[in-house]
């Protein structure tokens, strides 16, 4: 074991059990509050041959949760299983009143929510008056447990001791393990592991902490992705140029995930769901191609929107408006926050003259508290948490809203918020000699990377010995310690990085990558930040 890797493990308090997690270390699913009641009611529905409707969400977590729950119910022997996903533009998030007539018309005896439902007591009560029971499986905040539900399975429940919060798909998989165990006399038969491809995608795309159970599920989920039987994922991966047998969290988060999410953002999440459930290669290819096209459309719309924002003032919070696709405003807010390092509200104009949008923040500025501070009547609707929110206001109230938000921010007297965006280096190198294939392979043992287990960041200060700009937007440099040169890449590099010159002394933060070409293997760096210390 290299010196650097030993130090990394010590700094993070990790041991062999973290590097090689065991599937058998997952908790007994029946330890989760409400699980026994949920399984009992599903067993009754199976025996009665009741129609079961799974009600999900329109993002990647909702789509994968719905797929896992559906497969688990079918494997349990349930014969009538439908899935309903809300439309972002017509229905909004979660189990809501517009869904009630459709649930009744489909003849449901039982509704199982996935990735939603914790705040839908009124809808659950209405369904109950129609003789329809509801089981809630969710992972969002749950201030009050829906008392009318047959069972509520949510790791955020008060008194829940099951473990770390997991994505909606993680909760659905825990239900799947419980159903499998019930079917097989108390012990899972292992077939439930084939659902872990969906669990890996949903967990990574929902930015869950990759520790404890989440790490175990994603660790094995990436193995299952390499062997997945789902034609839809196979075809989507080809279009995304993603090798499933080499998949990592970056590929899930930046290649597969955006294409799955594009369905709900740009059109309807049913397209992504149909892809997950497709048994036909031709149909899977058609759907994957449509998702790929929608993702291109999403990316183009997002880039146009960011450019249209134009010159911005020096306000500490950005509040911008435009005529943009409703499904991309959250991404636009996030992109502007990333570029300008300021909290952002991005609002788009609707046909009725109102403005609907999203906010993104970081540090000590809570968007939820900012919305709560608004004068009565300023918001038509709004809610969220510290880092992200959704809202709508009258078009005529835009300047009033902007003025209030800026004044509210200033009243907090926050200092040095950009510190929350600075990347902390795990390893500061004195020279480049220790960057080896052995170290790279050791670092890979820490996968899957994500919140709670970030990819190790290296830092080195040295001389730029070579520079190339590729396609006018990507930067390739070689950094030297006078004995060894290491190539480093920055894709879509900002202007300040592109302006670096050969001979400059730079402080660079980077993660490790491996370049294999013509039988040669070289360790390279992926640039996170680049600062010129001394000009040529």
Image (spheres, rainbow, N blue to C red):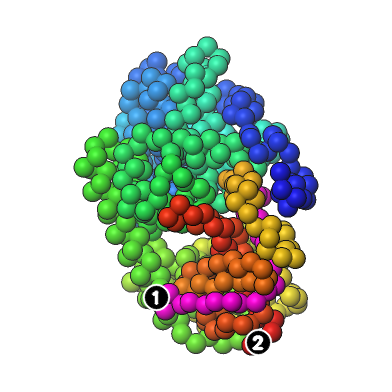
Q: Which residues are magenta?
A: 451-472
Q: Is residue 461 magenta?
A: yes
Which quadrant would residue 30 be assigned to in this image? top right
| Residue 471 numbered tag | 1
Measured as percent of width and height from the top left, residue 334 is found at 52, 67
Front residue of 244/384: it is 244
Between the C-alphas of marks 2 and 1, the distance is: 25 Å
Q: Is residue 87 left or right of residue 342?
A: left
Q: Is residue 380 left or right of residue 240?
A: right
Measured as percent of width and height from the top left, residue 280 is found at 24, 37
**Rendered view: 425 above or below 191:** below
Q: Residue at x 65, y 50 (%)?
A: 439
Q: Which callout, 2 or 1, points at the residue further toward the start of the chain?
A: 1
Question: Dot 2 corresponds to which residue?
Answer: 535
Front residue of 284/404: it is 284
**Rendered view: 495 above or below 153:** below
Which quadrant would residue 478 be assigned to in this image? bottom right
Measured as percent of width and height from the top left, residue 343 is found at 60, 72
Q: Residue at x 78, y 47 (%)?
A: 10
Measured as percent of width and height from the top left, residue 359 is found at 54, 67
- Badge 2: few (under 14), some or many (20 or more) residues near its Cα, within 10 Å? few
Q: Is residue 59 magenta?
A: no
**Rendered view: 297 above or below 143:** below
Disc nearest the viewer among 2 and 1:
2
Number of numbered tags placed on the structure image: 2
Q: Is residue 483 visible?
A: yes
Q: Are marks 2 and 1 in contact (CB under 8 Å)?
A: no
Q: Quadrant of the C terminus?
A: bottom right
- Name the secondary structure under disc 1: loop
Q: Residue at x 46, y 35 (%)?
A: 224
Given the current orientation, which residue lies at the most extreme left position? 282
- Name the secondary structure under disc 2: loop
């Amino acid at each position: 074991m290299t010196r650097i890797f030993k130090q990394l493990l010590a700094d993070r308090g990790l041991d062999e059990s973290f590097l090689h997690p065991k599937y058998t270390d997952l908790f007994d699913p029946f330890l989760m509050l409400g699980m026994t009641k949920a399984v009992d009611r599903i067993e009754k529905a199976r025996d009665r041959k009741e129609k079961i409707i799974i009600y999900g969400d329109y993002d990647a977590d909702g789509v994968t949760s719905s797929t896992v729950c559906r497969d688990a119910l079918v494997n349990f022997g349930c014969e009538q299983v439908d899935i309903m996903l809300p439309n972002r533009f017509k229905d909004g998030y979660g189990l809501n009143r517009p869904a009630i007539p459709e649930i009744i018309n489909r003849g449901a005896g039982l509704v199982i929510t996935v990735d939603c439902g914790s705040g839908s007591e009124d809808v659950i009560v209405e369904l109950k008056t129609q003789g329809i029971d509801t089981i809630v499986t969710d992972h969002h905040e749950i201030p009050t447990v829906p008392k009318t539900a047959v069972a509520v399975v949510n790791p955020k429940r008060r008194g829940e001791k099951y473990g770390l919060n997991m994505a909606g798909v993680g909760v659905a998989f825990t239900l799947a393990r419980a159903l499998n165990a019930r079917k097989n006399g108390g012990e899972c038969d292992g077939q439930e592991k084939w659902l872990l491809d969906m669990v890996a995608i949903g967990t990574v795309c929902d930015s869950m902490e990759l520790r404890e159970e989440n790490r175990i599920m994603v660790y094995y989920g990436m193995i299952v992705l390499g062997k997945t039987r789902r034609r839809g994922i196979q075809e989507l991966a080809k279009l995304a140029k993603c090798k499933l047998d080499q998949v990592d969290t970056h590929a899930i988060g930046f290649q597969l995930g955006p294409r799955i999410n594009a369905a709900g953002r740009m059109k309807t999440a049913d397209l992504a769901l149909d892809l997950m459930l497709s048994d036909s290669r031709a149909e899977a290819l058609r759907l994957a191609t449509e998702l790929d096209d929608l993702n291109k459309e999403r990316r183009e719309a997002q880039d146009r929107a960011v450019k249209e924002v134009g010159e911005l003032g020096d306000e500490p919070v950005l509040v911008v408006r435009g005529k943009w696709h409703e499904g991309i405003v959250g991404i636009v807010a996030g992109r502007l926050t990333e570029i300008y390092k300021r909290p952002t509200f991005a609002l788009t104009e609707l046909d009725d003259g109102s403005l609907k949008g999203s906010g993104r923040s970081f540090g000590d500025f809570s968007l939820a508290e900012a919305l709560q501070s608004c004068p009565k009547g300023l918001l038509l609707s709004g809610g969220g948490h510290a880092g992200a929110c959704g809202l709508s206001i009258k078009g005529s109230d835009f300047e009033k809203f902007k003025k209030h938000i800026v004044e509210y921010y200033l009243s907090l007297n926050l200092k040095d918020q950009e510190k929350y965006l600075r990347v902390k280096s795990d390893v500061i190198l004195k020279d480049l000699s220790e960057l080896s294939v052995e170290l790279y392979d050791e670092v890979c043992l820490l996968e899957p990377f994500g919140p709670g287990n970030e990819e190790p960041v290296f830092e080195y200060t040295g001389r730029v010995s070579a520079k190339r700009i590729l396609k006018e937007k990507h930067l390739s440099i070689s950094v030297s310690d006078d004995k060894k040169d290491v190539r480093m890449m920055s894709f879509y590099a900002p202007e300040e990085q592109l302006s670096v010159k050969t001979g400059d002394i730079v402080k660079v933060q980077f993660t490790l990558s491996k370049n294999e070409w013509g039988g040669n293997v070289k360790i390279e760096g992926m640039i996170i930040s680049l600062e010129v210390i001394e000009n040529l």
